[in-house]
């Protein structure tokens, strides 16, 4: 049983077949799937699961704080089941691969009172962007960037 499933059971969240399959799909390290990828994988286990059910389940899990949305500057959001383990991310700017960085960088960077512009800072997330080993080793398969000129 996945850590996510265990947490959901402990919360008393009713694990229907659809919710269980979504939780199973989100199991593992470095899992950062889009909603469509979750639906595709869940459909292999439960062919009748609808796209709307997957989206609703993901939204519910985000609202519960059991998974988090990860922004990649791409159009589709990605979902990270490691919401309870502080970590940062490495993102490939070419293929979109995301990897967790554990343990997080400590101490986390802070802002002075003037730099925070009146915000009360509650969390710090760091994202490193670059090329993954696959994209680095196969430069002919990637589109040229302005820095390549």
Image (tube, rainbow, N blue to C red):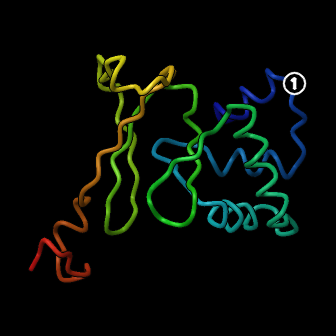
Q: Residue at 70% across / 40% down in the picture?
A: 62
The residue lying furthest to the left in this view is 149
Q: Residue 47: image x %, image y %?
A: 82, 69
Q: Residue at 85% across / 66% down in the picture?
A: 50
In which quadrant will I find the N terminus?
A: top right
Q: Residue 26: image x %, image y %?
A: 63, 47
Which residue position holds label 1? 12
Dividing the picture into quadrants, the one containing residue 144 is bottom left
In which quadrant will I find the C terminus?
A: bottom left
In the image: residue 33, left or right of residue 86: right
In the image: residue 115, left or right of residue 66: left
Residue nearest the viewer, comparing 133 with 106:
106
Q: Residue 130: image x %, image y %?
A: 24, 56
For label 1, the SS is loop
Does residue 24 sit above or below 96 in this rendering? above
Does residue 40 sit above or below 8 in this rendering? below
Q: Residue 15: image x %, image y %?
A: 87, 39
In the image: residue 63, left or right of residue 142: right
Q: Residues within 10 Å of mark 1 (few under 14, many from 20)?
A: few
Dividing the picture into quadrants, the one containing residue 46 is bottom right
How many callouts does the rendering have? 1
Q: Residue at 24% across / 60% down in the picture?
A: 131
Q: Residue at 54% across / 43% down in the picture?
A: 28
Residue nearest the viewer, comparing 16 with 67:
67
């Amino acid at each position: 049983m996945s850590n996510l499933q265990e947490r959901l059971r402990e919360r008393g969240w009713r694990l229907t077949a659809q919710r269980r399959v979504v939780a199973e799909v989100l199991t593992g390290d470095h899992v950062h799937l889009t909603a469509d990828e979750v639906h595709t994988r869940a459909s292999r286990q439960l062919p009748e699961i609808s796209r709307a059910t997957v989206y609703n389940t993901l939204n519910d899990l985000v609202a519960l704080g059991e998974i988090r949305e990860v922004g990649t500057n791409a159009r589709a959001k990605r979902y990270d089941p490691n919401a309870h383990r502080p970590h940062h991310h490495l993102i490939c700017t070419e293929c979109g691969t995301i990897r967790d960085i554990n343990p997080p960088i400590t101490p986390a960077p802070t802002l002075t009172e003037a730099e925070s512009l009146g915000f009360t800072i509650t969390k710090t997330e760091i994202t490193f962007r670059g090329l993954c080993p696959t994209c680095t080793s196969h430069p002919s398969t990637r589109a040229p960037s302005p820095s390549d000129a």
